[in-house]
Image (tube, rainbow, N blue to C red):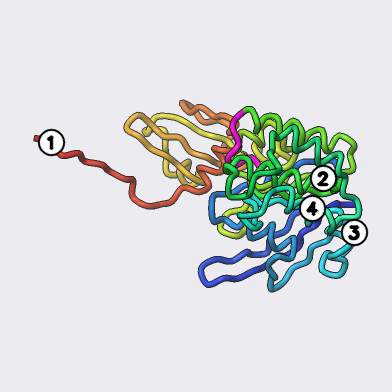
């Protein structure tokens, strides 16, 4: 049974819409939720948590409809935004005392260990924290009641490389039992290379792909070569293409490429390349002309 199932999620705003967003996450896995800024990542996560109300669609957690069993299911979810949406003049200790009352499974010992591990000073007020420390505090709150499902928005944003690596290692430890799962949004694709099992890619409010990480990248190929090799037929297969005076590099679906491309290098892309070439526009290339004597 899937831990989380999102089906047909739709939400319209004047300048943006979520369009039929669907994906699922099984127990014991980490799913990276990727897309450029404004693509719908945070909107989707808030819709899952019923912080905004979609026009249509269903959210099922542990086989139960989230809207019907929201109070009980939120006991089993750890949710963290990139920032801490609490009173800026309150201390962390004061905020934690309030949050802990909402969870019957709150573990003060686990919270204390996370505070030590993250180097948090609970006597400080929220507005005294750096961006990275706000992220760490939000994570400490999200993880301290033994949630089965962690839903995290940009959890590694603002963290230094060492702290990010420690957090990703912690993520892998959390899912080792096979009972918990993590869904986290990010634009730091190197984090996904290290820890994600599945990738869900959203673009302009629509899901482009949602599959295991290896299948996600294997579905595409980067093709590189001289401009003379960029035939009209090859250009028509490219999702995105970048041209220079020396040649071109483009992204295509693996299934769309012919078995042989003489004079062209074909490579498996990384996650970042898939995103970059999907997001390329068809506008004229930018030309910069400096002032000269």
- Residue drawn at x 81%, y 38% is 112
Q: Residues within 10 Å of mark 4 (few under 14, many from 20)?
A: few
Quarter of the image for residue 140 reads top right
Under tag 2, what secondary structure? loop
User: Is 41 left or right of 72, judged from the image as shown?
Assistant: left
Q: Residues within 10 Å of mark 1 (few under 14, many from 20)?
A: few
Where the C terminus falls, by quadrant? top left
Q: In this figure, which residue is indicated by the disc labeled 1?
A: 292
Under tag 3, what secondary structure? loop
| Bounds of the magenta segment | 155-161
Q: CA distance from mark 3 to mark 1?
A: 67 Å
Q: Residues within 10 Å of mark 3 (few under 14, many from 20)?
A: few
The disc placed on residue 63 is 3
The residue lying toward the viewer, choosing from 226 and 52, is 52
Residue 58: percent from left, percent from top: 78, 66
User: Is 167 left or right of 275, judged from the image as shown?
Assistant: right
Which of disc 1 and disc 3 is earlier in sequence?
3
- Residue drawn at x 35%, y 29% is 246
Which of disc 2 and disc 3 is earlier in sequence?
3
Q: CA distance from mark 4 to mark 2?
A: 12 Å
Q: In this figure, which residue is indicated by the disc labeled 4?
A: 97
Q: CA distance from mark 3 to mark 2?
A: 23 Å
The residue lying toward the viewer, choosing from 125 and 25, is 125
């Amino acid at each position: 049974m899937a831990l989380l199932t999102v089906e047909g999620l739709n939400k319209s705003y004047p300048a943006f819409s979520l369009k039929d967003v669907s994906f699922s996450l099984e127990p014991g896995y980490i799913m990276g939720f990727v897309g450029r800024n404004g693509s719908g990542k945070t909107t989707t996560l808030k819709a899952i948590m019923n912080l905004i109300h979609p026009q249509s669609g269903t959210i099922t957690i542990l086989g139960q409809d989230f809207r019907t069993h929201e109070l009980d299911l939120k006991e089993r979810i750890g949710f963290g935004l990139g920032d801490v949406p609490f009173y800026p003049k309150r201390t962390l200790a004061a905020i934690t005392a309030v949050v802990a009352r909402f969870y019957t499974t709150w573990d003060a010992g686990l919270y204390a260990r996370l505070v030590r591990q993250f180097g948090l000073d609970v006597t400080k007020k929220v507005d005294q924290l750096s961006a990275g420390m706000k992220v760490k505090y939000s994570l400490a709150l999200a993880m301290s009641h033994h949630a089965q499902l962690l839903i995290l928005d940009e959890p590694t944003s603002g963290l230094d490389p060492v702290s990010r690596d420690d957090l990703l290692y912690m993520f892998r430890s959390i899912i080792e039992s096979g009972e918990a799962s993590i869904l986290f949004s990010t634009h730091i694709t190197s984090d996904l290379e290290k820890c994600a099992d599945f990738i869900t890619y959203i673009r302009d409010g629509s899901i482009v792909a949602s599959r295991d990480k290896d299948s996600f990248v294997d579905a595409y190929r980067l093709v590189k070569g001289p401009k003379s090799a960029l035939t009209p037929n090859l250009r028509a297969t490219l999702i995105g293409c970048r041209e220079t005076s020396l040649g071109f590099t483009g992204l295509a679906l693996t299934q769309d490429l012919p078995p042989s491309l003489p004079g062209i290098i074909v490579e498996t892309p990384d996650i970042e390349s898939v995103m970059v070439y999907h997001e390329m526009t068809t506008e004229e290339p930018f030309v910069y002309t400096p002032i000269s004597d």
